[in-house]
Amino acid sequence: MGTTQPFEYVPDETGGDVEELAASTLKPGYAAKMLGYSSQQFREMVHRFKAQNGAGPNDDLEWHDNGDVYFNGEYIDNFHDYQN
């Protein structure tokens, strides 16, 4: 190792298309925190959201960190539009 030279680390450049993945959850408690709502405000919004979109009280929704909501893999609406 006496002749080994130190090297400078150079990270690989990313190339090509980069796909941004959204964080998502099926759990309302996590969704409330992720979207920045209090649990009370979130519950009120969920009731309005489900009533206006024909979802039942036991239907599981999937929330994404940008506010988009999906049911059974289909986009329904953006949750932020249901604020008080």
Image (tube, rainbow, N blue to C red):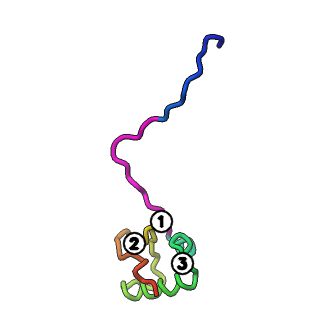
Residue marked by disc 3: 37
Residue marked by disc 1: 24
Whether residues under marks 3 and 2 lie with C-beta atoms below 8 angstroms apart, the answer is no
Q: Position of residue 34 (x, y in %)?
A: 53, 69
Q: Residue furthest right?
A: 2
Res. 75 image quadrant: bottom left
The amino acid sitting under disc 1 is Ser
The amino acid sitting under disc 2 is Tyr
N-terminal-most mark, 3 or 2: 3
Whether residues under marks 1 and 2 lie with C-beta atoms below 8 angstroms apart, the answer is yes
Residue 54 in the image: above or below residue 13: below
Q: Nearer the viewer, residue 30 or 55?
A: 30
Alpha carbon distance from label 1 to label 2: 10 Å
Residue marked by disc 2: 70
Name the magenta segment's main secondary structure.
loop
N-terminal-most mark, 1 or 2: 1
Question: Is the N terminus in the top left, top right, bottom left or bottom right quadrant?
Answer: top right
Alpha carbon distance from label 1 to label 3: 15 Å
Magenta region:
12-25
Q: Nearer the viewer, residue 14 or 45?
A: 14
Residue 48 in the image: above or below residue 21: below
